[in-house]
Image (tube, rainbow, N blue to C red):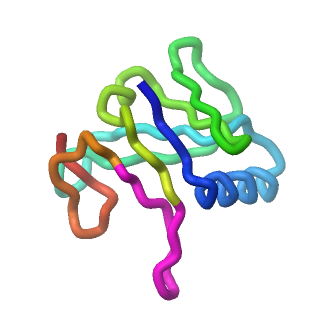
Amino acid sequence: MSVSLTPAAARHVQKSLSKRGSGLGLRLAVKTSGCNGFAYGLEFVDATNPEDACFEQHGVKVIVDPRSLSMLDGTELDFVREGLNEGFKFNNPNAKANCGCGESFTV
């Protein structure tokens, strides 16, 4: 099982962690919500739990809890700019459908 970051996503996370002044990495999780049943959750991590899975790429750690891992396996986290908008894009091979905003999905 794995989760990966593109170089652009890693640069954005590193920049954000530097501004914040602390943190081990980024937690990626799945929550029940959104128009399709599940939504992605992102937050900075100061400590991990023993059962967490940790993936490191481009000098950035992504931490995933065991419940979310099966729905996120193979996901690539990217950071994209489209016109005036920018944000994370989730390339999740487990998602059967995504909502128009790209933040909720169904498996």
Q: Is residue 61 left or right of residue 53?
A: right
Residue in the picture at 51% in, 69% down: 80
Magenta segment, which residues? 79-91
In depth, the one of 22 and 105 nearer the eye is 105
Residue found 69% across the figure and 44% down from its top: 58
Is residue 81 a member of the stretch shown in magenta?
Answer: yes
Apparent side of residue 5 relative to residue 19 in the rendered image (left or right): left
Residue 23: name its quadrant. top right
Residue 42: where, in percent of width, then height? 50, 47
Residue 5 or residue 18, whichever sits in front: 5
Q: Quadrant of residue 32?
A: top left
Mainly helix, strand or loop, the magenta region?
strand
99 or 2: nearer the viewer: 2
Looking at the figure, which quarter contains the C terminus? Answer: top left
Query: Hey, which quadrant is residue 73 in on the image?
Result: top left
Question: Is 65 displayed left or right of 24 in the figure?
Answer: left
Quadrant (top left, top right, bottom left, bottom right) of the N terminus: top left
Q: Residue at x 23, y 46 (%)?
A: 95
Q: Is 37 on the left-hand or right-hand side of 79?
A: left
**Location of residue 78 in the rendering, given as x and y in whole percent from the top left corner:** 50, 57
Residue 72 at what x, y percent from top left? 36, 36
Q: Percent position (x, y) of residue 33?
A: 25, 48
The residue that appears at 23% across and 69% down in the rendered structure is 100
